[in-house]
Amino acid sequence: MDEGRKKTLKLGLFIILMCLFASLFFVWGLVNKGKLVFYGEEPFSLLVFGETETVECLEVPCEITLNAGTHDVLVTKQGYRNVFTEQRVRTWRSTEVNLEFRIVPTLMEAETMPVSPRKPTYEIVSERATGMQKLVDTDDGERRALVYFQGAFRDPKIFGDDRFVLVMDREIYKVDTENNTREEIRGLDLTGIAEIKWSMDGRYMIFEREDSPNLWIVDTENERMEELTITNLELTDWLYSNKVIFLTNQNFITRSGTDEEAYPYGEFTEDIKAGGYTLGFYYPATNMYSRVETFERITSEPEEFTALANGQSVYLKMDGEKFKIILRRF
């Protein structure tokens, strides 16, 4: 076989192999696919980066077929924050993706406000029968003892709500009025307290001090005290999860990381915002703050501020009008 025929044969063989490879590659592209199966509150939309069409999911499960590999997916739902997820698609397999949508907090009018619990008043009185001092609710006509004290108080200061009470004199006590127990708080300087708010379980106490523009917090379990950067006790409330929800017109500086609700961590400064108030969370266990949302419609300090203890909604009263901010749906 001459040299020319050999070259022609080699070229033909190369072309055949290339066509065969291209065919196999094309066929593999057709079969090398898998599925992503999405579950969540419908309707929602899916946009796969690199794809041109948006998939509208009107019912679940919502399936899309993609080439095997890693794909970035943007999930959108009206009234909720966008969800960005990275998913690996495996050949001939289905991968389930469970979506958790988080509502976009929005200020809206409300028909009612939550009923605030009774704010009791307390006093220390002497009991003739025992010669001891006792803490009583001034609205209790029978003057029944909530707890007894052996020492003699000289000029006690009392701060409390319908469940927990702080009694301060030479010693400092935390009283649980539901279980009729008391415990002494040692090693902390709590002088100058003006007003307090107890956490739901009584572990934490957030309070104002006469000598400080900022709020303070006490962890009675670890006997630890911290100065906060937020300033208005009337615009704070406690949730069941032992975190503080608050409203402030202070500026916010974003830091790295997000909280359990995917809100950004950061710090509140002494500077006042040019407009609007910001809703935020404070986490006593980690001494961290996060920013929920800034509401430009809130231009002055609300007359009332209260949150549902489960964290579902916050209620405000401004200029006599009632408003609410829905944070989650149950």
Image (cartoon, rainbow, N blue to C red):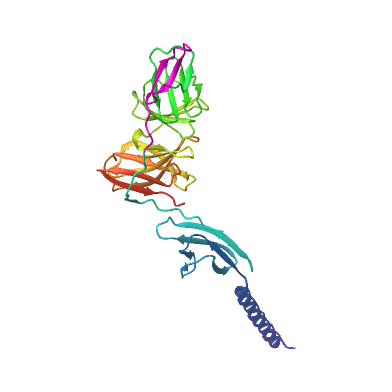
- The N terminus appears in which quarter of the rendering? bottom right
In the image, which residues are magenta? 116-143
- Residue furthest to the left: 319
- Residue furthest to the right: 1
Name the residue located 41 percent from the left edge and 16 percent from the top edge: 125
| Residue 89 in view in this figure | no
Residues 207 and 255: in front is 207
| Residue 279 in view in this figure | yes
Residue 269 image-quadrant placement: top left
- Is residue 128 one of those drawn in magenta? yes
- Is residue 136 one of those drawn in magenta? yes
Q: Position of residue 292 (x, y in %)?
A: 40, 46
Q: Is residue 134 above or below residue 5?
A: above
Q: Position of residue 143 (x, y in %)?
A: 41, 21
Main SS category, magenta section: loop
Q: Position of residue 82 (x, y in %)?
A: 44, 57
Name the residue located 53 percent from the left edge and 61 percent from the top edge: 39
Q: Is residue 58 above or below residue 219?
A: below
Picture mark count: 0
Left or right position of 2 against 214: right
Name the residue located 49 percent from the left edge and 57 percent from the top edge: 84
Left or right position of 185 against 323: right
Q: Is residue 11 above or below residue 76?
A: below
Q: Position of residue 50 (x, y in %)?
A: 49, 66
Residues 26 and 256: in front is 256
